[in-house]
Amino acid sequence: MYMTMKILFPTKIPYVNIWPRGLATCIQYSTFSNEARCLLFSKDCQICPHTSSRTLKQINFSGWRTVNVLHKQNCRTTTTRHFSCSLDNGKLQDTKCKSNIDGGRRLDAAKSLDAGRRWYTTSSSVLDESKQPSWKVLFFGTDYFSLTCLQSLYKNRCSNGLIQQLDVVVPQSKYIKKRRKKDDRIISPVLQYAQQNGLKVYYWPMKEEVKGYDLGVVASFGHLIPGKIINSFSHGVLNVHPSLLPRWRGAAPIIHTILNNDAETGVTIMKLLPKRFDVGPVLHQKTVSVPTDCTSQSLCTTLADIGANMLLEVLRDLPTFTSQERPQTEDGATYGGKLSSEYAEINWSKSVEDICRQYRAVSFLIPLHTRWKGQHVVLGNMCNPEQIKDLSTKHSSATEGQICYHKEVDLICIKCRDGWVGFQHITIAYRQRLSAREFFNGYLSSSSAEIQYFS
């Protein structure tokens, strides 16, 4: 099969198509000496200690000639690429390529070049757009963000063959969240989906070496994967991370995005490196505006859908994305650590907007809480502050933390720095949950003369 391959203009570092495991090849043509040379490059574009004479069998450009190039693909199998070039009056008019293997991508460049340039460079990887790779993937995940990526891979495996094999790794504990009550525990949705669809499941930590997979894919896994496992994949491990790295590395990027009132966020596809979380080179990145008044759950759903689509984009053309990867810088790097109960503790000296943002960010995992008379108090179902704006006029002299029952809307309201926030439910010292009216009747109405405060 013949395909048109266009010549690239020369640069200080010629265009190279980086193949997995860090090898690349390119061919350079000289219009002055009518010769060609083949170079092997490492991943950082340094010439490898392989001489061109060992890879080039025929270098004469008198009319149409064929150049046979031996190319070691994936560091395992040797394949031969055949190139034919025409030299006419000092100009390269056209180039054709014939390949004895399948797979690949076409390159863009100029078709006719000025003879005044000494070397013209083209990639030796000329690929057929009608073909696509077929990957054997081992997926690492736990929660609902992971689930969307897994579903996308599984549907693709069933429909168009981009995924040849798909197996799953989950933590040994099948629960992603353990609450005080046993019935409130949440089983890993990734584990449930894998079992329902007959996918093979491995449990972390893995006791055996990973064998037989091309690629690992990680999405919200929460465990540091050692180098020996990363290196066991012939194409490494990709990580789907819901932030614009290097901002919000770590376990809870979405929560920290909302807590810090970021105007935009996004999804990053990066290569996994051992020893540290979220520091690998970036292959693909997309930016998303953070919707007004969104919650962590709604933003997670949005980013998971985007991340799943981005992952398929990368898998369809991994060599290209790999060749364009860029290292992360430490400028603007921030860390979003695991969620703890401290993130849900209300400070009544904060503004209404701050407390609302705190509720949207963390309450789906840990309810907001405060203290009252030395007891732990959980506040639930926060209302829209617009419902209780009239309290600022009725209780203009109220101080931070002061409690008020709003009878018209049936809410327990608390004064903060610049207004009031209201809640429908309250739980005292892990006992039975009370409605706002029940809390007022049981604890506030009998001592109406005494002003009550949360601390």
Image (tube, helix red, strand yellow):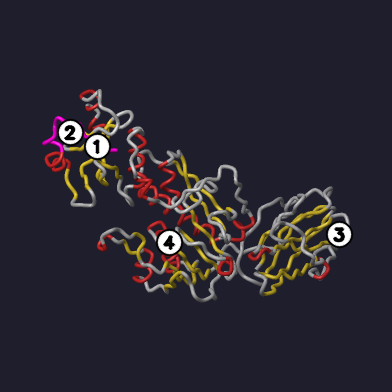
Residue 261 vertical placement versus 315 (above, below): above
Q: Secondary structure at mark 4?
A: helix
Quarter of the image where the C terminus is located = top left
Q: Who comes first in sequence, dot 4 or dot 1? A: 4
Please tell me which residue is depicted at 52% across the width and 52% down the height of the picture.
Answer: 268
- Check if mark 3's residue and mark 1's residue have beta carbons within 8 Å: no
- Check if mark 2's residue and mark 1's residue have beta carbons within 8 Å: yes
Q: Who comes first in sequence, dot 3 or dot 1? A: 3
Q: Who comes first in sequence, dot 4 or dot 3? A: 3
Residue for badge 3: 34
- Coordinates of residue 278 in the picture (x, y in percent): 54, 54
Q: CA distance from mark 4 to mark 2?
A: 48 Å
Residue for badge 4: 152
- Please, what is the three-letter code of the amino acid marked with disc 2? His
Within-10-Å neighbours for mark 3: few <14, some 14–19, many 20+: few
Q: Secondary structure at mark 2?
A: strand
43 drawn magenta: no
